[in-house]
Image (tube, coloured by chain):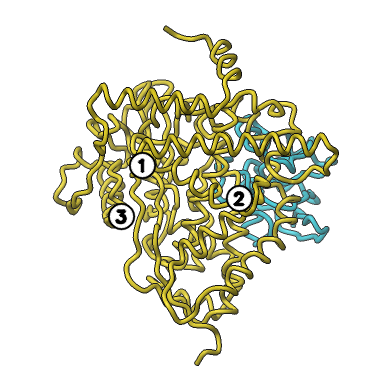
Chain colours: A cyan, B yellow
Amino acid sequence: MAAVTFVSHDGEKCEAPLDEGCSLMQVATNNAIAGIDGDCGGEAACGTCHVIVDPTWADKVGPSGPEEEEMLSMNPERQATSRLSCQIKVSESWDGLTVQLPEFQM
Amino acid sequence: MKIPEAVKTKVEAAIPLDRQVQAAHLYDKGRRWLTGTNGQKMFVEGPIPPVEEVALEDIDLSNPFLYRQGRWASYFKRLRDEAPVHYQAHSPFGPFWSVTRHADIIAVDKNHEVFSAEPLIVIGAPPRFMDIAMFIAMDPPKHDVQRRAVQGVVAPKNLREMESLIRERVRDVLDNLPVNEPFDWVSTVSIELTARMLATLLDFPFEQRHKLVVWSDLATSMEQANGGPSDNDELFRGMVGMARGLGALWHDKAARLAAGEEPGFDLITMLQSDENTKDLIKRPMEFAGNLILLIVGGNDTTRNSMSGGVLALNRFPDQFEKLKANPDLIPNMVSEIIRWQTPLGYMRRIAKADTVLNGQFIRKGDKVVMWYASGNRDETVFERPDELIIDRRNARNHIAFGFGVHRCMGNRLAELQLRILWEELLPRFERIDVVGEPEYVQSNFVRGISQLMVELTPKGAR
C-alpha cells in the first residue's frame, strides 16, 4: 500500500497510508500523527498543518496556492517547499512521499 | 477637508506622542462640553430580559451587560437557531450584523478581500484621536509587513527560551498562595502571571509591571468602543502616562543596543532590528497602536482563561476529577478552557462590497460582527457545547484565536502559559474551590472575570 512518511523535528519517522482523495492533513489526523493540528478543519485558515515537502517531491506535490500562501508567509518557520497539508490532495501514486514537520505549528 | 496621508504622518512625527494624547484629551473635553454629555454614562445597567421575551429584531448583542448577567448564551443560541446572520438596526453603536454560526464566522474571517478589518475591530469607535493604528485593524499587505516584524517574539526559539522562565514564575506565585482561606484568584494569580510575562516580552522594568496592566485595562474599557466603564479623563491621563513610559522604554533600549549590549529576544529589540519598523517611534500613533495591541493581546486574554479555567472546573467538578486522574489531558483541556471562556467575544469587519452571507444580503459599508463566543457554542460543531469536557475530541477546532491572516499571533504562548499553570497546580492542590459568585467585567468585547474568590486545599492536608 502506498505510504507517506512524516519526519518530526527531532528526526523521528512515522508512516501512514496514502488514501486517495484525502488531504494530507486528514491522512495525518486519521493516523494520529503528532505535530499536525489542523485547527480550522481544512480551510487553509489557521496554518496549523504546516509541512515542509521533501525537495525531491516538491514538483510532484506542487506549489502553494494564494490562500495558503497568506497563512504561510506569516510563519517564521516557513521554508521554500512549505505547504499547508490540508491543501494537498494525496495520490496513491505518491508512494514514498516524505514531508518534514516544523518544530511548532503556529 | 481631507488631510493627505503624507502630511498627517509628518505632523504626527514632529509632535511627541504624549503631547498628541494631551491634545486629544482637550478635544474630547470640548466635545463633551459642547454636546452637554460631560459626566453622562452611555450605559447604565438594568436587568436584561430573558431572550424569549424579546422580538428577534430587537436582540442587541452589543449590550455590555449581557455577559455579566449571564444572559449571553441564550441570546446567542436564539440567533444561531433563528437568524444566524442577524441585523440590529438601532444599537447605541449604530446598525450592525451579527454572525453567530461557526462555519459562517470562518467564512467571514478568511475573506479579507470582502470583509475588511479596517479601521477598527470593536463594534464602536474609541474617542477621536484614540483610534490609533494597529495591525489587527489593517488589511494585507500593510498588515503583513507589520505583523511579520513582531511575529518573531513568539517564534519557537523564543518559546523554548521562555518555557523555563514561565515555569519558574508560576512556581514562585503558586508557592506563595494562601491556603485554607479565601483570596482573589484574578488579582493574585491571573493578573500577576500575565503581568510578569508581559514585562518580559517587552523588557519593561519588572518592578513597574503593574503599569502595563493599568494601561491595558484602560485601553479595553472605553465606553464608546465596546461599552466599557471608562471615564474619559482617567483614560486620557492614563494614555499620556503610557505614551511617556513606552517612549522612554524605546529610547532606553535603543541606547543600550547602541552601547553594545547584547540584543535581547524582546519585542522592542525586534522592532528596532527590523528594517520596516526600526523607525517606528517616528510614527508615534502606529508605535502606540502596535504596542497597545500586543499589551492587550497578551493581557486580558490569557488572564481570563487562567480565571475561566478555575471557574469552569468548579462548575463541572467531574472534569476536575478526570483531570486529576489523568494529567496528560492538560494540553487538550487548555484548548477546551479557551473555547469555554472565549476571552474576546468577537472581532468586527466592514463589508468592502455588496455580498451574500448565509442567505442575507450585506451591503458595502455594513458593519459585520463575528461572535467567536457564539461560534464556540455552536451545537453543530461541539456536542453539549455549554459544558467543559476536558477530553473533548475537537476542542482544538475552537474559534477563539480567530482564523485567517489575523489569527492570534500569541496563541502558542498563551497555551504554553496555561499548560504550565495547570501542570504546576495539580501536584500542589487537592481542591481549588470557588467561594461565592464571581464578578464580571462590563464590556461587549472582553469576556472578563474581575473577581474570583477561591480557597485552596493543599495536597496531603487530610
Residue at the location (37% across, 21% down)?
A: B364
The spot of residue A64 in percent (x, y) is 69, 34
Q: Is residue B281 visible?
A: yes
Q: Nearer the viewer, mark 1 or mark 3?
A: 1
Can you tell which mark lies on residue B198?
2
| Secondary element at tag 3 | loop
| Secondary element at tag 1 | loop
State the residue position of label 1.
B230
Q: Which of A37 and B232 is in front in this view?
A: B232
Q: How crowded is the residue under tag 3: few (<14 C-alpha within 10 Å), some, or many (20+)?
A: some
Name the quadrant containing residue B143. Answer: top right
Q: Which of marks 3 and 2 is in front?
A: 2
Q: Which of marks 2 and 1 is nearer the N terminus?
A: 2
Q: Nearer the viewer, residue B13 or B398?
A: B13
Image position of B309 (left or right of B419): left
Can you tell which mark lies on residue B68?
3
Q: On what subunit does the disc labeled 3 rest?
A: B
